[in-house]
Every structure is written in structure tokens, then in C-alpha cells.
Image (cartoon, helix red, strand yellow):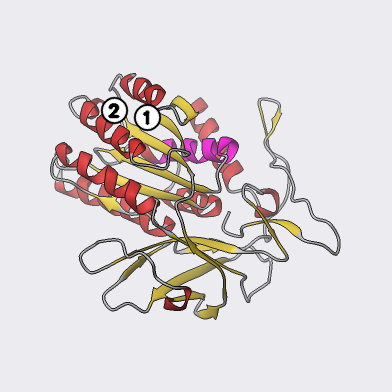
Amino acid sequence: MLSRCAFCLFLLAGLLWTQDQLPLTIFRTESDLVVLNVSVFDKDGNIIKGLPKSDFTVQENGENQEIKVFRQEDVPISLGLVIDDSASMKEKRDRVNSAALAMVRLSNPQDEVFVLNFNEDAQVAQDFTSDVKRLESSLRVSHPSGQTAMRDALVVGLDHMRAHAKNDKKALLIVTDGEDNISIESQQRLVEAAQRLDVIIYAIGLLGAEQPASARRARESLEELTRATGGRSWFPADVSEVERITPEIAHEIRNQYIVGYTPTNTAQDGTYRKIHVQVSVPGATVRTRSGYYARGGHTSGALRYNGVDARFPGVNSSPGGPVDCLRPGF
């Protein structure tokens, strides 16, 4: 437990490192750019495509922002499948595995996907790949046992994304069947880490067998994570419904709008900035991340773990010319 505690704390410390040292996504631009992945749904929950830029309004801390980047296109993503492998999942894993593969098959062929199994520990069963057969083989390597450390597993998934993802757009799908009952990491710090890395979190909670109070807490935790990062949560009554949900997630990811703006507040003070996006379509629902952390405002200092420097590489810039800059939300 002590070694797991130290490892998780190390990972989260790295994920929450000052953004001046987190150039995970590089944009060629004259100034910092906040980039949002935006999903728009009609009143029946269907994705709305083809909206013009003029239909969108973006606010940061209540102030309107000028949209400078706008497009809707199917871009490759880096995706992590974070699958509960605790004892209670034994009778559900086959269905979940099939649903996860259905999602991969309906995703962009250029996506890269990794698989992470977890109980009280988390293990990357398959590193990033676009090979469906390799993903299928890795999903079959399952030995359900132990308890559910969901938050710790997501921290491991975020760190793997930070260290190895090649695509700008990133998402995690968490599938779990119970309340987190053993994690070391707090919900608040997990949400912050996900927002700093701009990773969309989708969640499927198979909570039918949980006691009502436990199911309620698990649901609230998953909904908070997905709402803060721009994803969605599903809570099917039966595991058989998962195979309907995962294609829906793939469809949403492939039909999101990319909306970018340069903040009017240029202070690099490390503060949290709330984001609100609206569309001028009656009855429409908009989903994107709820905010980001501005760069700056953190103390510096390299992290080391087992003799390895955990500091992230710096941002390169050329005086008087364009800057390779990090999205402020990372």
C-alpha cells in the first residue's frame, strides 16, 4: 500500500505540474490559444452537424471571446480504454470487451488506443496501437479480482496519455461497476489533472448491483468527471446495453466541433477560468470542458522518481516570430 501510495502521488504531482512545463500539444500561433472539443445535441439527443461559426458563442468567466478557430472534422484521437477488472466484473468482462472493440472498429482508423485494466492496481495491458487484433487480445487478458481503485487508475491513464499520446485530441473511456473504495487520489485533484491535460472522459457505470447509497456516490463521481472534461456518462440497467453505448461514443467523438479562441484575459496567473459555450439553436445541448487553468502561478522544481527526471520539456519560442505554445487548458 505504501509503495502504491508513493507511486500514485508521484504521477499526480507530474500531471499537476505548472503548464509552463507542459507542452503536450503544440500550436503554431502568435499567442496562447484555448481549443475546445464541442458536442452539440438536439432535444432528442442526436448530434447536430453542420452548424456555422456564427451560431456559436464562447464565454470565459462571463466575458465573450472571439472565436479564431472553427471547424467540424473527424480528426484522429489518442484513446485509453480504462476497464474495471475487480472481482465483481467477472461475469461482465466479456460483454464489456466486445463493446470496447465495437467502439474501436467504429472510430477513426488512424486513432491510437491503449488498454488499461484495474482493480486496486492498474496495469497497461496494451500500449497505444491501431491494430484491432492486438487490442482484442489484450482485452481478453483479464483476471477479475480485488477491489475498485478507479481514481488511481485514471491517474495512471492520464499519465500514460501525457507521456505517450501522439494526437492532439485525447479521451479516456472508463467502465466500472462499483463505487471507488480504495483509491488514494482525491476526486478534486483527479479532475484538475484531467482538465490540465485536456483529456475528455467518458464513463459507463454498471451500478445495478450496488447498494443505493453506494450507487449514488459512484454516479455522482462519474458525472462530475465527465461534466468537467466535456464527456458524458451512461448508467445502463444491464451490461448488455453497453454494446449500444460504445458506438454512440465513437460517433460523438468523430463529429465534434473544434472551437478555439485567444483569451482576453492574458494574465499568466495559474487561475481557473470557467468556459461556457452556447449555440443559437432552440432546444440544443452543448457539451465541452467546463474550464481550464491559465499558465503560471505555480512554483517550479524538477521532480525525480527512481532517478528519472520527471520534469516535462520546456516551450520553445523564437523572439519576434511565432511561438510554439501550449494550449492553456493543458
Q: Amino acid at mark 2?
A: Ser
Q: Nearest the camera: 185 or 327?
A: 327
Q: Are marks 2 and 1 in contact (CB under 8 Å)?
A: yes
Q: Position of residue 225 (x, y in %)?
A: 38, 52
Residue at 59% x, 36% y: name it: 163
> How many numbered marks have been drawn onto this rendered protein structure?
2
Tell me which numbered mark, 2 or 1, is placed earlier along the sequence: 2
Residue at 42% x, 42% y: name it: 108
Q: Amino acid at mark 1?
A: Phe
**Residue 235 in sight in this render:** yes
Q: Nearest the camera: 173 or 45?
A: 45
Q: Secondary structure at mark 1?
A: strand
Q: In the figure, residue 119 lies in which quadrant? A: top left
Seen as rendered, the residue at the extreme right is: 319
Q: Is residue 75 magenta?
A: no
Is 229 situated left or right of 320 in this image?
A: left
Is 78 situated left or right of 43 in this image?
A: right
Q: Nearest the camera: 64 or 310?
A: 64
**Residue 184 in sight in this render:** no
Q: Main secondary structure of the magenta part?
A: helix
Q: Position of residue 197 (x, y in %)?
A: 54, 50
Q: Position of residue 76 (x, y in %)?
A: 49, 45
In the rendered image, the vertical position of residue 257 relative to residue 182, given as above or below: below
Disc ID at residue 86? 2
Disc ID at residue 118? 1
Seen as rendered, the residue at the extreme front is: 50
Q: Position of residue 190 (x, y in %)?
A: 46, 48
In the rendered image, the vertical position of residue 281 relative to residue 285, given as above or below: below
Is 25 situated left or right of 132 in this image?
A: right
Write down the region rendered in magenta.
Answer: 151-165
Crowding at dot 1, Cα within 10 Å, few <14 / some 14-19 / many 20+, comes out as many
In the rendered image, the vertical position of residue 3 relative to residue 177, given as above or below: above
